[in-house]
Image (spheres, helix red, strand yellow):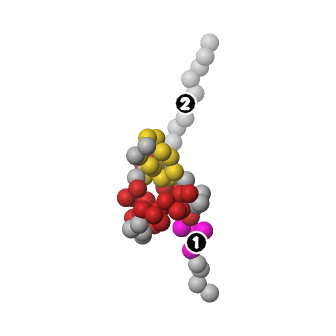
């Protein structure tokens, strides 16, 4: 025969635990909704460039990741753009 275990905690600790659980799920939900792939205009905006040619050059040199689900649609991996920007940032002396 299985017996149920009972765990008792104070009201204060219960609400503290509840807040942590809610915070965890809010954080997790935010990450799931974050865009992984962005379009050309968003990529150019992140890189602060206006030229499609410059974006093409970064793509063809393998400096940023991209996906081409159809002939006219090119999507860029947001994380690779952030990585590229971080690798090309300069720290002050």
Image point 42% across, 69% down: which residue?
48
Secondary structure type for disc 2:
loop
Residue at the extreme bottom of the image, as rendered = 93
Magenta residues?
85-89
Position of residue 59 in the picture relative to residue 48 (left or right): right
The residue nearer to you, when weighing 52 against 13, is 52
Mark 1 vs mark 2: in front? 1
Residue 22, placed above or below residue 78? above
The quarter of the image holding the N terminus is top right
- Displayed quadrant of residue 86: bottom right
- Residue located beneath label 2 in the image: 6
54 or 9: nearer the eye?
54
Disc 1 designates what residue? 88
Q: Position of residue 79 (x, y in %)?
A: 53, 56
Q: Residue at x 50, y 46 (%)?
A: 67
Point 48% across, 45% down: residue: 68
Percent across and percent down for residue 76 are: 48, 53
Observer able to see residue 24: no
Counting other residues with Cα less than 10 Å from the Cα at mark 2, is it few (<14), some (14-19), or many (20 or more)? few
Residue 64 % position (x, y): 55, 58
Percent x, y of residue 78: 49, 55
- The answer for how far apart the CA atoms under marks 1 and 2 are is 56 Å
Secondary structure type for disc 1: loop
Which of the two discs, 1 and 2, labels the residue nearer the N terminus?
Answer: 2
Q: Is residue 39 visible?
A: yes
In-front residue for pair 9/58: 58
The residue at the point 43 percent across, 41 percent down is: 70
């Amino acid at each position: 025969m299985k017996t149920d275990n009972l765990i008792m905690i104070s009201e204060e600790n219960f609400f503290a635990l509840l807040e942590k659980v809610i915070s965890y799920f809010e954080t997790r939900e935010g990450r799931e909704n974050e865009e992984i792939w962005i379009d050309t205009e968003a990529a150019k905006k992140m890189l602060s460039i206006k030229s499609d040619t410059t974006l093409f050059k970064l793509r063809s040199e393998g400096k940023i990741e991209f996906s081409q689900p159809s002939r006219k649609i090119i999507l860029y991996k947001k994380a690779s753009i952030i990585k590229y920007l971080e690798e090309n940032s300069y720290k002050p002396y």
